[in-house]
Amino acid sequence: MSAIDTLPPLRQVIEDHQLSARKALGQNFLLDLNLTAKIARRAGDLSACDILEIGPGPGGLTRGLLAEGARKVLAIEKDARCMPVLAEISEAYPGQLEVINGDALEIDPLAHLTPPIRVAANLPYNVGTELLVRWLTPKQWPPYWESLTLMFQREVAERIVATPGSKAYGRLAILAQWRADAKIVMTLPPEAFTPPPKVHSAVVHLTALKTPRFEADASVLSRVVATAFNQRRKMLRASLKGVAPDIEDRLLASGIQPTERAEQVSIEQFCALARAVAQT
Ligand code: SAM
């Protein structure tokens, strides 16, 4: 009998521990272990990796990751009610699951992990994009993680993989595709979750590139792109006016017409602009 068979079904776990979902914590649980195993497989070969999971909740995806052979899982969960449930999973997989009760935005996971590291999570919607942007914008590249396999609301997933000229194209697409390959690997209807959210969800798989596609400073690029898309309908010479007094010259030097709008500009052009803005 494998370890996963010794653990009770997730519906029973939720009932026994009275884990009623809390909206403020973005709690929409996955209770189908076939589905969580499928998501875990989308994260790639786990056997030689440590996995960082944010928001394990009652542990459906955690079980999937362990059953799929993860070397070690570090799970960071804010809700203290989930600790006893996660402790039961730890017991079934001795030495393979470490759980931290805390806020993922405040905990540095690196002290607890050994490379190579992959990240897998059904993210709480309220902190999902914040965490993604942090994973994508460290000063040093390549980052500590090799891949991110993340569940988002489908609309957010579409923004991550969007191409120039589309409505969904913006800061997330540029930051994600600048230094990673990003694709949607699965979509899920609301009924896949308990309780069902209002919208569809999707899993995005991002693989870190060894070197960024184009040279640029992450914080300058992030600032320029955020400013440009803040007023996405305006011409760049207007939306970026506050970035540099001679922004029109810098746009032209980067091969961008000052009359263009942010959504027409490629990642390569935004990187050229970030380099031009960084020059004193
Ligand atoms: N992974 C579980 C699943 O798939 O069933 C739960 C996913 S649920 C969408 C998001 C989880 O993130 C919840 O368990 C919630 O308590 C947790 N969470 C919310 N905010 C968090 C934070 N700042 N740090 C860590 N966990 C958080």
Image: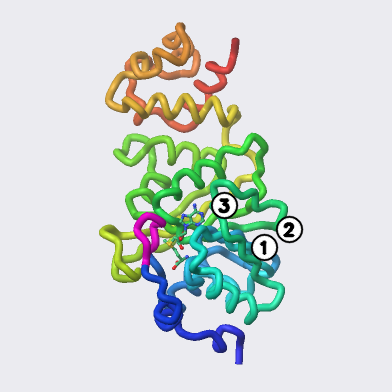
Residue at image x 40%, y 63%?
186
Three-letter residue code for mark 2: Thr
Some atom of ligand 1 lies within 8 Å of the CB belonging to the residue at label 3: no
Residue denoted by label 2: 114
Front: mark 3 or 2: 2
C-alpha span from label 1 to label 3? 15 Å
Three-letter residue code for mark 3: Thr
Which numbered dot is residue 203?
none
- The crowding category of the residue bearing disc 3, from other C-alpha atoms within 10 Å (few below 14, some 14 to 19, many at least 20), is some
Residue at image x 48%, y 26%?
223
Above or below residue 104? Residue 222 is above
Query: Does the magenta-highlighted stretch encompass residue 207?
Result: no
Query: Does the magenta-highlighted stretch encompass residue 26?
Result: yes
Residue denoted by label 1: 50
Three-letter residue code for mark 1: Asp
C-alpha span from label 2 to label 1? 6 Å
Q: Quadrant of residue 242?
A: top left
- The crowding category of the residue bearing disc 2, from other C-alpha atoms within 10 Å (few below 14, some 14 to 19, many at least 20), is few
Q: Which residues are magenta?
A: 21-27
- x and y percentages locating residue 166 in the rendered image: 31, 39
- Labels 2 & 1 near each other (Cβ < 8 A): yes
- x and y percentages locating residue 35 in the rendered image: 43, 74
Above or below residue 6? Residue 273 is above
Q: Quadrant of residue 248?
A: top left
Residue denoted by label 3: 207
For label 3, the SS is strand
